[in-house]
Amino acid sequence: MNMALPVEVKPNPNVPALAPGDTVKVNVRVVEGDKERIQPFKGVVIKVRRSVDGGSFTVRRVSRGIGVERTFLFQSPLLEKVEVVQHGKVRRAKLYYLRRRSGKTARLRERRLEKKEMALEAPEVEPEPEAELEPEQEAVPEQEAEAEPGPEEN
């Protein structure tokens, strides 16, 4: 067994590209007894750890005046969906300083995306091929509309 070659990890399709400072909404599957439900967790990404095993990211939010941090694995099957709500403008990789801040000082400025970045993030949707109509088929409805007298002409 060769230990030098790491196991290749496939990217999770439910998790987009994340960066520290992004405001994200993470939908997590929660199992309570025999029932399963989706629980949203919305907050700011304060740390992204990328490693051989897939890595993790930590999301922080303030709930009823108490700071709550939750760490999610990129490869976790419990992650239903991750949406990036807003991109934050930050100059650090780890935003631990947000723990000491509260109120308006804990807010981050929004990073405006350029057209190139927006094209990379937007899902590619193939345009549907338009059904080509023959010229005779297009002309038929127009002729029928002219031939039928309207209620005003009677």
Image (cartoon, grey):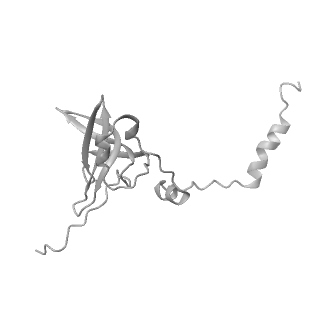
Q: Quadrant of the C terminus?
A: top right
Residue at 31 percent across and 46 percent down: it is 97
Residue at 31 percent across and 55 percent down: it is 12
Residue at 51 percent across and 51 percent down: it is 112
Toward the right, the furthest residue is 153
Residue nearer the viewer, 43 or 34: 43
Q: Is residue 44 left or right of residue 30?
A: right
Residue nearer the viewer, 74 or 34: 74
Q: Is residue 26 left or right of residue 33?
A: right
Toward the left, the furthest residue is 1
Query: In the picture shown, does residue 75 fall above or below 80?
Result: below
Q: Picture coordinates of residue 17 (x, y %)?
A: 38, 55
Residue nearer the viewer, 100 or 39: 100
Residue at 49 percent across and 58 percent down: it is 117
Q: Picture coordinates of residue 63 (x, y %)?
A: 30, 32
Q: Quadrant of the N terminus?
A: bottom left
Please tell me in which quadrant of the rendered image residue 55 appears.
bottom left
Q: Picture coordinates of residue 15 (x, y %)?
A: 35, 51
Q: How many marks?
A: 0
Please tell me in which quadrant of the rendered image residue 33 appears.
top left
Q: Picture coordinates of residue 36 (x, y %)?
A: 24, 35
Q: Is residue 50 left or right of residue 83?
A: left
Please tell me in which quadrant of the rendered image residue 80 appears.
top left
